[in-house]
Amino acid sequence: MKKYDFLSGIKSWQTLTAVLPIVILAACSNTNPQPKGDTEIKGKLNNGNGGSVYLDLMSTQGFVPVDTAVMDEKGEFTMNLDVKEPGFYRLKTSDRSFATLILTGKEKAIVNGDASNLSNTYTVEGSPDSKIFWEISQASAKNYKSRDSLQMVLQTFANTHQNDPAAIQSMNKALEEQYFSLVAAHNKYLSNLVEKNGSSLAALAAIQQLPSEDYLPLYFKLDESLFAKYPNSEYVKMFHQDVVNKKKLANGAEAPEITMNTPDGKALSLSSLKGKVVLVDFWASWCGPCRQENPNVVKAYNKYNPKGFDIFSVSLDSDLEKWKMAIQKDNLTWKNHVCDFKGWQTSVVKQYDFKGIPYNVLLDKEGKIIAKNLRGEALEAKLAEIFK
């Protein structure tokens, strides 16, 4: 069953209460428990009688054990620790059942929930940043679940109307409006939260759900605020570096050079197309949403190429024949096709800072970035504006 493009690239909402997007988690490491201090975590967990609850620091180097407590017969527990540097913590009863906390020092956090399913049942009070993170998780879970429901409706409808493409397209269009309404509402919620809580580490969990191409000034603003308050935080340093990279790709910046081989093995550079408006299109033969988007790209090329528009297609393929067959089958008739056959390990992923395909960057005649991730009608509208 194919995945229709307006539903492609959706993150699983279930992970949002369980994973901090900004932190790269590696293998577990061991350390001695921190000394007792003025930060307190206590709570009552149903179904936790007599079991243990553990606190780990979510370091960029891995999960670092911090403290352990045994719950009494009522599931009640208390921890006291010294928080030397504000950070993200994981309070867990198992690796699949945990609550995410943000501790900055001197909190009196109260965590309640079900010990067997803490990720989806916990509540937190007494820790302002933890509470903001919890609110983000709840709102995100609800919104992504609604989007998943739309996908299920469309897939069910398509399965029962396989011989009626027109009906499927009509349903797709109807659901598309609802889908983008959900996206817009959630983006507004997240951006407002970041504006209001720009000095909270919890804002990192919100900003990373917002597309940087649409919210770059907000990324810059949050980076400045957090870096001023937490200059030594490993999380903030990581985010700061990410923002520095994004600034290099901001509208008006010169596009990084790309030089790879064409299907016939000849080197071709992006800079060779200066003098034209160029769409740098990242795709792959194995990418379903990319193949579904290709007709829109072809349509734009056919309409605007005579006016000075061209396409530089960069494939994340690893198989030459499959790449060449997809070019032919999808009628990608322009000559500028390149690939280094390294898949996601290709250098352009970091150069252009994208995490999914299809993805594209539109350049002006001087090779400077003027827009990113234009698909379907958005690409057509932008080109119409340029070539009016």
Image (cartoon, helix red, strand yellow):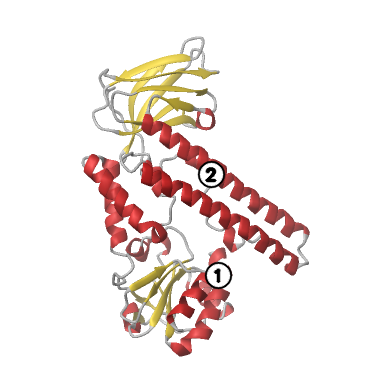
**In-image side of 8 versus 247 (left or right):** right
Farthest bottom residue? Answer: 306
Q: Residue 229 placed where, x, y %?
A: 24, 40
Assign a secondary structure to mark 2.
helix
Q: Residue 266 placed where, x, y %?
A: 37, 82
Q: Residue 309 placed where, x, y %?
A: 43, 83
Within 10 Å of disc 1 (Cα), the crowding (few <14, some 14-19, many 20+) is some
Give the residue at x 50% y 75%: 381
Give the residue at x 55% y 76%: 325
Check disc 1 and report the residue beneath it. Answer: 293
Which one is nearer the viewer's eye here, 17 or 207? 207
Give the quarter of the figure containing the N terminus: bottom right
Up-down: is 140 above or below 308?
above
> How much space separates mark 2 and mark 1, taking CA atoms?
25 Å
- Whichever of labels 2 and 1 marks the residue nearer the N terminus, that label is 2
Check disc 2 and report the residue beneath it. Answer: 13
Up-down: is 146 above or below 95?
below
